[in-house]
Amino acid sequence: NYGQFHHQWSKELVEEAGGLERLTIQHKLYFAFLKHLWLTDRREEALHRLNRLCDVVDLTTHCESIEDNSLRSACWLELGEWKIEENITPNAFISEPLQVEVLSEFKRATLMDGGYKAWHNWALLNFRIAQQLNESDDGNGNKRKGVPVSSSQRNHVVVAIKSFVSAISLGTKRWSASVQQDMLNFLTCLFQYGEQSAIANIINECVESVPIETWLGVLPQLLARIHIKSPSIRSVLHPLLVRLGEKHPQALMYPLSVLLKSPVIERKSAAESLMNSLRSHSSALVEEALMVSSELIRVAILWLETWHEGLEEASRLYFGEGNVSGMLDLLLPLHEKLEKGAETQRESEFIKTFGSDLAQADQHLKDYIRLFNEGGENIPTGSNSSSSYDGQGRHIRQNEEAETAMNKAWDIYYTVFRRINKQLPALTKLELSDCSPALSRARGLELGVPGSYRVDGSYVKIEKFIPSVQVITSKQRPRKITLRGSDGKDYVFLLKGHEDLRQDERVMQLFGLVNALLERDRQTKKHDLRIQRYAVSPLS
């Protein structure tokens, strides 16, 4: 509290400076000087002087009823940041006395309409302390698990959640990199502490106050946890995704089509549930997305390549590891797909060339399985199998008749593999009419060109697919495919069929953060420094 003495002192400061406006300018100049001291490694002096400046600015702001609190907030914020930087290394534990000091300083900054930066730092500090408490032991040498166990930790989590939301709502393009960090930390709070229903309820209330478009920036992270089992976390996550789907169905089409192909039952089931909610208002769009996704995969990996890759991996499992079970798990689904018949000209040609031989090999595999089952033996799975070895290290299998059937199958597979190997170098160009009639016929789709969707809801629709597809003659044989947009422009994509692009998608997300930081810095912006980014859309 300020008394008569403080008011008198403030009045003297104003008179000495030649007026309130001049005093404010002096304080701002002095603050800039202190930043210079800090950057020139006179840190102890800078801290001492800034501590006094904070008190003086507080005094004059209160006593002279100054409405603009920006300098006051900036001083307290800088003081807290400097103390953290001076006393601890990144990711190190913050001592309790330092926690109290810096929390007090950051809190003051938020109470003075400190804007985005104040709320961001206040949220981040509370989040960091909560994480620190989460990593400490319980006094008996046991590490605490990922849920708050103390009222102190719970309080820090709640404050962090509410403050991240305040920061996100105040964030502008200038702070886009930090806002992304706030969003990711907010999601960490949800996934790490959301099992506690009280915290989940608070998060649910906060989610409603965040503009729905903001969540598009962390959509990959939201969908990655779509199968989470915790009811309280699902009660936040699934309604949020449904709301996103209602407002921005285009943004969910490609990533959801990936999840529908997931081998994880829970993830696939959750994706189907969300896709059904999208069908209720965007049925045609959903069907187009599923068609385009599955057909692009068909173009990306022809049966010729599927069998080449499958036989190569099966050979490694069988001859390299003795893992017959793993080999069967790989080859039997390929045979089942073959039995369903061809849907394209390319697939018909494959069946005509290799169908008879592969059908014989399939029969030999089934004979092998039948003979093992009749003998009551377990199919070998490699190092943990009961098979023995002879003196020269060769495998001795117990069922000779079954072994004969397997050898016959592999004689055929070897011949087929060699023939495929000779054909692959000639694969330099594809016609969509031969490998995907559905894409070849597609016209005027509602589905957007991958990567064209924007936060404001604008996007370029797919008008058609250019009929010729170039196969690049590298090891993985990616395709160069061209889409014509509704704007009349051609969009060229690299279609990769042998890689999981989800990691590439995250890397592009990281590059976006780096670009935002480069844009914010005066020096890097002046030199127009940025990382070239590409639209990455995983399909499976």
Image: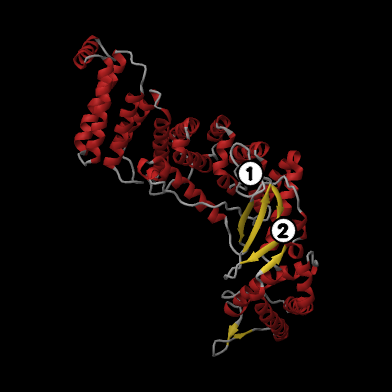
Q: Residues within 10 Å of mark 2 (few under 14, many from 20)?
A: some
For the residue pair 52 and 434, the one nearer the viewer reads as 434
Residue found at the very far bottom of the displayed protein: 391
Give the numbered dot on residue 251: 1
SS at badge 1: helix
Is 335 above or below relative to 90?
below
List x then y, in percent, for residue 472: 60, 67
**On the rendered structure, is 4 left or right of 461?**
left
Q: Against 67, is 483 above or below? A: below
Q: Which residue is mark 2?
A: 295
Residue drawn at x 65%, y 78% is 421
Residue placed furthest toward the top: 4
Up/down of 320 relative to 214, above or below: below
Percent across and percent down for residue 150 are 44, 36
At 55% from the left and 37% from the top, the residue drawn is: 214
Would residue 324 be visible to someone looking at this image? no
Task: Judge from the rendering whether residue 66 lies leftward or rightward of residue 294; answer left or right.
Answer: left
> Label 2 sits on what residue type?
Glu
Are dots 1 and 2 in contact, CB under 8 Å? Answer: no
The answer to whether residue 259 shows anywhere in this view is yes
Colour scheme in use: secondary structure
How crowded is the residue under tag 1: few (<14 C-alpha within 10 Å), some, or many (20+)? many
Q: Amino acid at mark 1?
A: Ala
Quarter of image, res 526: top left
Q: Which of the image's four quarters has the N terminus?
A: top left
What is the number of the mark on residue 298? none
- Depth check, front residue: 196 or 225: 225
